[in-house]
Image: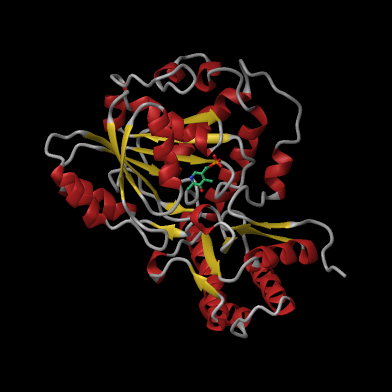
Amino acid sequence: MVVRAGREFLAIPGPTTMPDEVLRAMHRPAVDIYAGELIALTDSLHADLSKLFRTRGRTYVYIANGHGAWEAALTNVLSRGDKILVLESGRFALGWGDAAEKLGVEIEILPGAWDRAVRPHEVEARLRQDKEGRIKAVLTVQVDTASGVVNDIAAIGRAIKAAGHDALFMVDAVASLGCMPFEMDGWHVDVAMSASQKGLMTPPGLGFVAVGERARAVHHAANLRSPYWDWTAREGHEHYQKYAGTPPVHLLYALRQALDMLFAEGAEHTFLRHRLLAEAVRRAVGVWAEGGVLSFNILEPSERADTVTTIRVTGDGTAEALKDYCRDKCGVVLGNGIGALSGRAVRIAHMGHINAPMILGTLGVVEVGLNALRIPHGRGGVLAATTWLGDNVPA
Ligand SMILES: *Cc1c(COP(=O)(O)O)cnc(C)c1O
């Protein structure tokens, strides 16, 4: 017996659900890539991406996923043998640091933990010790999609400044851009990167790197630069140079549509929608946790991200069983635990094209699964979510 039919609902933290408008925007024939509307489309995307990152600097668009954008960010500002500081808070900053190491950069990891955010004062203390300025860059993520943590990027930016250190501040905003505030210039971020398939509601395949003035200056001397990623090469006058070859035409139309929808909603409204739906998820998880099997991975409530919630699940095979049930019986795909939480967590994404029925439906399905599998849990998680939403989304 199953109660699934029709569209499967993806509650994984990327790729995320795409609006029908975005899907339709791609349904068109190929167009000229040397003249005509595509040229203006590229210009509009560059301008609007910089707006989204909240920077006066330039944004570059790559045919790449987040891993590609990581490499683009690194190779344009670093040289072989440079040292960088990687702020641990789960999996993704470490992954970015790992890429740097493979490129020939020396990495130092500022130890963190899987259940909490980066502590800005620890960043400041470490940088103060670096009297010779050996550390060329600090790498961190805004939201770690594995642990579900949100780092305080503004506070880390202030900590770097307080240390009086020149290191570039480089931030991964893959799981947060377009869903929660990001102030590249205001927060002293020198290089920020993101990708199309999470908060930006667009198919996987586009990577973005936004670049501030200090990074642009360092770029000239960086010796890890390579032809495809190179910013300078992408500043040529010919349209194809902006993509180092054929543009990803249909993805560009998709992104244009997604950005139009985001701007039409308005950033403040988009951020609030995410905050409200994330809190609805947290209300449910808080109740389920009373059963002693499920718990929040991130211990401090204010460090839980508004885009993804990571739920620890104790017991051999329990997380997998819950995930299988939700998918096979109800057509909802939850994220699994990854990295240190592999097999010991499920993740509920709430980023991008999300609304009340999607999130409440997902919570309802999880509760069905908890009941069917006889997993001990506090009763009334969905009720807590709907009660909270009713109280906070006034008539
Ligand atoms: C998904 C993700 C990435 C990697 O993106 P890919 O497109 O899968 O390469 C990097 N950083 C964060 C924070 C992510 O969530």
Horizontal side of 179 relative to 326 (left or right) equals left
Q: Residue at x 68, y 76 (%)?
A: 370
- Most extreme residue toward the bottom is 379
Q: Nearer the viewer, residue 276 or 88?
A: 88
Horizontal side of 20 relative to 166 (left or right) equals right
Residue 279 point in image, percent of width and height: 51, 71
Q: In the figure, 137 relative to 148: above or below?
A: above
Q: In the rendered view of the protein, which quadrant contains the C terminus? A: bottom right
Q: Is any atom of residue 278 visible in this view?
A: yes
Q: In the figure, 66 relative to 111: above or below?
A: above
- Most extreme residue toward the left is 131
Q: Nearer the viewer, residue 195 or 365?
A: 365
Residue 68 point in image, percent of width and height: 51, 32
Q: Is any atom of residue 59 visible in this view?
A: no
Q: In the figure, 62 relative to 324: above or below?
A: above
Q: Residue at x 47, y 38 (%)?
A: 49
- Most extreme residue toward the front is 316
Residue 205 point in image, percent of width and height: 60, 35
Residue 334 point in image, percent of width and height: 65, 60
Horizontal side of 158 relative to 282 (left or right) equals left
Q: Residue at x 47, y 54 (%)?
A: 267
Q: Colour scheme in the image? A: secondary structure
Q: How many marks?
A: 0
Q: In the rendered view of the protein, which quadrant contains the N terminus? A: bottom right
Horizontal side of 30 relative to 101 (left or right) equals right
Q: Nearer the viewer, residue 118 or 182?
A: 118
